[in-house]
Image: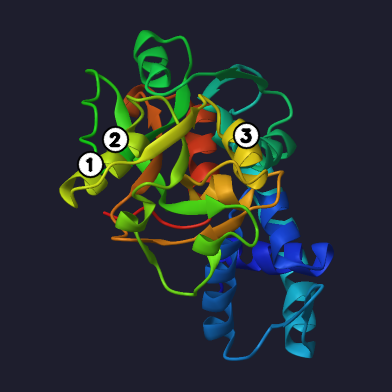
Amino acid sequence: MYDPTRLAALVAVAEAGSITRAAARLGYTAPALSQQLAKLEREAGAALLVRHHRGARLTAAGELLAGRARRVLDEMDQARHELARLAGLSGGRLRVGTFTTAGIHLLPPVLSAFRRAHPDVELSVRDYEPPSGVAAVASGEVDLALTHAYEPAAPDPMPAGVSVEPLLVEELVLISAVGHMLSEGTGPLPVTELAGRPLISSAPGHPPRRGVERALAEAGATPAVVCESPGYALVCALVSAALGVAVVPEMVAAMSPAPVAVRRLEPASFRRTISVVHRGERDTSAATTLRALLRGGFGRSAAP
């Protein structure tokens, strides 16, 4: 049986004409969407896409499956709507917390799907810089919230009555200006190569910066931080202008509005886990429904 999330990915590529545009529409990273499509091709036992320099087009098998997938997805949306009515999920409200990156790149298509299925539920969204969203759930300020945790930093403990469900794990990658010497090569770049390089970084206490500094210190080197910024959008813009390099989550790199080159790092132990925090058994029907949509809508499963 085909996974509905992967069928939706195929339909999105058919409509967008490229994996990158389809990923942006669905709120995935392009590598995550490619993973879903590769799994769908294995399930189908046939090539579904042909990639070319301007994007991607569906093969005959892909066109056939996409046509069927549209009907299946429409039926599933209708079933969700009718089941929600039977469960009494009409009216009421749902208060959602998010951090900025997820709020821009991941949450909108999920909330759009929720709105289509449950137009009578009043939605509100609030922006929290992690871990503030966890406290907002604990206090009842919001019903659930998206948050994140970085590795190798130790995770923060959850307050009593709050549950956490991992949704997505992404690597931290190096971004540099297009054509920068560190962008050359296909293999992962040893993090020690950042020693002495102009580094555009987050604030001193931010986990990605601590992880890079720790790895360099273990190698007897130190980074040369030339600029600090609290926001990834500015970091990407400065990197694109060739003022330095930066280490950011791969979703940030993939969605950068400014052109940047991306390269994986070695060791690949720098990761960010995006999770949804909620009130467990005290969740409302609306919150439980949105959590299910979040699980289906995110581009990859979180590592255990």
How far apart marks 1 and 2 lie (CA) works out to 6 Å
Is 63 located above or below residue 16 in the figure?
below
Is disc 3 in contact with disc 1, using a CB cutoff of under 8 Å? no
Residue 214's tag is 1
Three-letter code, disc 1: Arg
Near-viewer residue (231 or 16): 231
Instruction: Check disc 3: other Cα within 10 Å, few if <14, some if 14-19, many if 20+.
Output: some
Residue visible at 37% across and 20% down? 134
Residue 298: tell me if it is visible: no
Q: Is residue 252 above or below residue 261?
A: above
**Residue annotated with mark 3:** 233
Q: Position of residue 5 (x, y in %)?
A: 58, 61
Q: 283 or 149: which is nearer to us?
A: 149
Marks 3 and 2 in Cβ contact (< 8 Å): no
Depth check, mark 3 against mark 1: the one in front is: 1
How far, Cα to Cα, is label 3 from label 2? 20 Å
